[in-house]
Amino acid sequence: KVGDSKGSAIVYQGGINIPLSMKLNENNRPTMWSISAGGAYAKLNNKNFTENLVVDEIMNLGLSLNHLRPISHRWSMMLSIGGGVYMPSTRFSDIRYKNMLASGGAIFIYHLKPNLELGGGIALNNSFGYPMVFPAFYFNWRLEGRYSVKVSMMQGMEISAGYNVNKFLSMNIVAEMNGQMALLEQDGEDKIFSHQYIIVGLRPEIKLGKHLSIPITAGIHAMRPAEMTKRSLKSLFRNGSYYFQASPYASAGLQVKF
């Protein structure tokens, strides 16, 4: 808390992954080209802030080209290149070069077991105004059947454990980390506003056939950091000073598999 300040948030987001080509090798591992696109809009209802510590809305749009291929019996390589727009408003006429980010990455994945994959590599982006290389990590573990477990660290973090009641319904306990950010200028300085949230909740998922499902989640925001920092390398080593405290959380979605 900062004084008497408080706030809530509502987030609309969606994404699509479109395979352009795919073939499987003798180990049933794919060589695939795909395009991914996604967008998010966050409306922050901020109250009693006397300093410029938050923004009222965030719009994120992104597009990437991805390539996955096996390079040996146990190893695969995943490459991506893309870019996005990170705005503190929804006005497309306000988009400037400073609101755009380019990104890329290369990750080498080790298939430890059919349901367990570990990997590492590098990620490249210009978050601080110039290209920088960061370490990238990949972890994917899943169990499927009457009981299911999934741990994924690909985009954000997702952990779930569930019970498949029948072919129409599954009940899951989930923990996720997600967020948005905006690149902006404030008081003559280039800054980054980041809005993150860690949620824990119960998620029933209604399955309408093989290709359509409706996940509904109720739980809590365990923590919701929302920070304005300078767009410089020094900000990486700055301790976070404010965040929104725990609060109720609810969401509903639609998932379509083509």
Image (cartoon, rainbow, N blue to C red):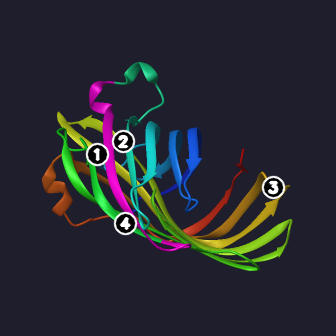
* Residue type at tag 3: Lys
Q: Residue at x 44, y 38 (%)?
A: 64
The residue tagged 3 is 210
Q: Position of residue 78 (x, y in %)?
A: 40, 52
Other residues around mark 2 within 10 Å, as few (<14) / some (14–19) / many (≥20) = many
Quick one: which residue is furthest to the top in this view?
93
Please say if the residues under marks 2 and 1 sit with CB atoms less than 8 Å apart. Answer: yes
Q: Nearer the viewer, residue 85 or 255?
A: 255
Please say if the residues under marks 2 and 4 sit with CB atoms less than 8 Å apart. Answer: no
Q: Which residues are magenta?
A: 96-116
The residue tagged 2 is 182
Q: Residue at x 44, y 44 (%)?
A: 67
Please say if the residues under marks 4 and 1 sit with CB atoms less than 8 Å apart. Answer: no
Question: Tag on residue 119?
Answer: 4
The residue tagged 1 is 192
Q: Residue at x 51, y 45 (%)?
A: 32
